[in-house]
Amino acid sequence: MKTNGDCVACHRFLRFNVVGFAGIFVQLAVLAALTGAFGMHYLAATALAVEAAVLHNFLWHERWTWRDRTRGAAARETLARLLRFNLSTGLISILANLFLMRLLAGWLGLPYLPANMLAIALCTLANFAASEWFAFAPARVSAPISETAGPPARRSQPLP
């Protein structure tokens, strides 16, 4: 039987994938434009295309996927989340995409757009985990110090 927490995680994963699916189009469009229209090497274009998708996805995750954790946040908190998101999912995406593109398009000779789609799919679970437990992790709340607590109890025996 699923608990409410499982349902929340399932819905969040579904939203994560909807946003990611839209991000795929951003990434592929930037990749196609940079390689086709501007003649950029596919690896350099891949890095820039991934970053464009990461920024796109962050904006949507901020406003939809994790809005329960981000609503009403100060600009400083949002920038800190963007940094964590870029350092986690951005780094995972860029490094894995570059490696997989080199493998799939470079060594195996697959066309770069299908190779990139496969690379994106392979990064999905790692990126969700990094987002859920690092970039958009719930704020940690310290336990309040009780005002009624007295000083620490004295030891009956001196320390050796």
Image (tube, grey):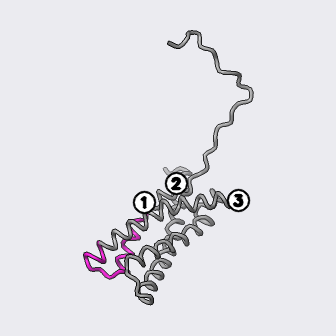
- Residue at (41% x, 70% y) in the render: 120
- Residue type marked 1: Ala
Packing grade of label 2 (10 A; few <14, some 14-19, many >=20) is some
From the viewer's perspective, is 13 left or right of 62?
A: left
Packing grade of label 3 (10 A; few <14, some 14-19, many >=20) is few
Q: Name the residue that disc number 1 marks.
A: 126
Near-viewer residue (16 or 153): 153
**Residue 123 covered by magenta stretch:** yes
- Residue type marked 2: Phe
From the viewer's perspective, is 115 left or right of 137?
A: left
Task: Name the element at disc 2.
Answer: helix
- Residue at (43% x, 63% y) in the render: 92
**Residue 105 covered by magenta stretch:** yes
Magenta residues?
Answer: 103-125
Residue 43: where, in percent of width, then height? 37, 76
Number of numbered discs on residues:
3
- The earlier-in-sequence mark between 2 and 3 is 3
Q: Name the residue that disc number 2 marks.
A: 134
Residue 97: where, in percent of width, then height? 38, 70
As drawn, the label of residue 72 is: 3
Residue furthest to the right in view is 148
Residue 32: where, in percent of width, then height? 43, 84
